Amino acid sequence: MSYNNDNGPNKTTGQYHSMKGTVVETIGNLTGAQSWQQSGKEEHAAGEGEYNAAQAQGYAEGAIDRVGGRKDAVVGALSGDREQETKGNVRRDKGETQQNINKPQ
């Protein structure tokens, strides 16, 4: 699995390698080149794995922001700190959006 820099899995590069692997496998099928077929299958599988790992990571990060934001909003509301409450609500909304974007199919 190829990772983008040191930031972990990446959905874009995962899609790229998945598509590239499919193209290479197709060329191998058309030409009868077994090595291209195998290489394409492997790259496609690695790309799919990277995409799925990035999606799971994004969903988990969203859950952390959602829960942390909710906590901050409640603490802010209870203590009368409107700034903390607002920041918590914004963080919770950001986490919810990130979870929706990365929701498993």
Image (spheres, rainbow, N blue to C red):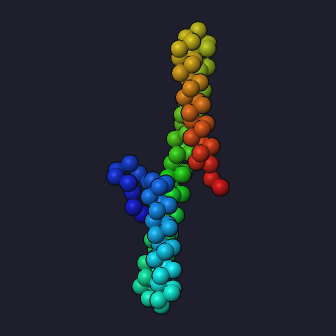
The residue lying at 52 percent from left, 41 percent from top is 61
Quadrant showing the N terminus: bottom left
Q: Position of residue 49 (x, y in %)?
A: 50, 62
Which residue is rendered at x = 62% and y = 48% of the image?
A: 103
Q: Is residue 19 above or below residue 103?
A: below
**From the viewer's perspective, is 6 left or right of 29?**
left
Q: From this viewpoint, which residue is outermost toward the bottom?
A: 32
Assign the C terminus to one quadrant of the image: bottom right
Residue 95 seen anywhere in this rendered image of the structure: yes
Relative side of 13 to 66, left or right: left
Q: Could one spot residue 63 in this view of the protein?
A: no
Q: Quadrant of residue 35?
A: bottom left
The residue nearer to you, when weighing 101 against 61, is: 101
Against 92, residue 6 (above or below) is below
Please name whichever residue, 97 or 1, is drawn nearer the observer in this view of the structure: 97
From this view, report whether residue 9 is shown above or below residue 68.
below
> At 52% across and 46% down in the image, what residue appears?
58
- Residue 96 in the image: above or below residue 38: above
x and y, in percent, of residue 90 in the image: 56, 26
Query: Which is nearer the eye, 79 or 37?
Result: 37
Q: Tell me the residue at 59%/24% (across/down).
A: 89
Q: Position of residue 37 (x, y in %)?
A: 47, 82
In the picture as drawn, the residue positioned furthest to the right comes out as 105
Res 69 quadrant in image = top right
